[in-house]
Image: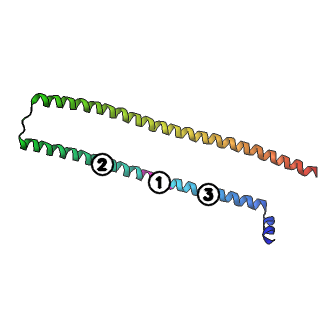
Amino acid sequence: MSETKRRDDVNPTTARTATTSVIDTARDNTLRIIDEVAKAQPQYAQALTNLQTDFIQTTRNFVQTAFDTERQVIQNLNVPQNPQISELVARQSNEVTSNLVRALGTYNQLAINAIDAARENSKIFSRTVDAVTEFNANVLKAWTNYWAFQQQQFTRAF
């Protein structure tokens, strides 16, 4: 019985203020989390860039060492080579390399275009959220006005 009485004694204005306070607190806490992520993002991006740069340099060093070792082995074995075959292999290697470089250029451009499209889609999504929020606020306002009007009509009848 005392619990029922406590529920009946709750002031609607106080309850509404408490609910608004909880919503404001949740919003503020969510925004704090987003701000913390935003603060860490440049460090994360820099760490990732450093890792990629180090990996590229390590790969470059590996390739140079591997081919230097191969050259030393061939020179020490003193294996005769056919100049025509060497020229053919060198020409084909240059062609393959040129094709790969062009393909990488195309891939990089496609990746950049995809990232730019994702950024644009993010902006569109943000504008859509704003429009939907405004629409919902207008609907809520209309329903609130309608409800208040119906309550007034109901209370006048008695």
For residue 32, what is the image quadrant? bottom right
Q: Quadrant of the N terminus?
A: bottom right
| Mark 1 closeness class: few <14, some 14–19, many ≥20 residues within 10 Å | few
Residue 39's tag is 1
Q: Nearer the viewer, mark 3 or mark 2?
A: 2
Mark 1 is on which residue type? Lys
The three-letter amino acid code for the residue at tag 2 is Phe
Left or right of 129 on screen, residue 158: right
Which residue is depicted at the point 65% across and 41% down? 132
Question: Is residue 56 rendered to the left or right of residue 134?
Answer: left
Say whether residue 56 is magenta. no
Residue drawn 92% across the image and 50% down it: 156
Counting residues from the start of the chain, the first of labels 3 and 2 encountered is 3
| Mark 3 Cα shell of 10 Å, populated few (<14), some (14-19), many (≥20) | few
Distance (Cα) linking label 3 and label 1: 20 Å
Disc marking residue 150: none
User: What residue is pinned by disc 3?
Assistant: 26
Type of secondary structure dominating the magenta stretch: helix
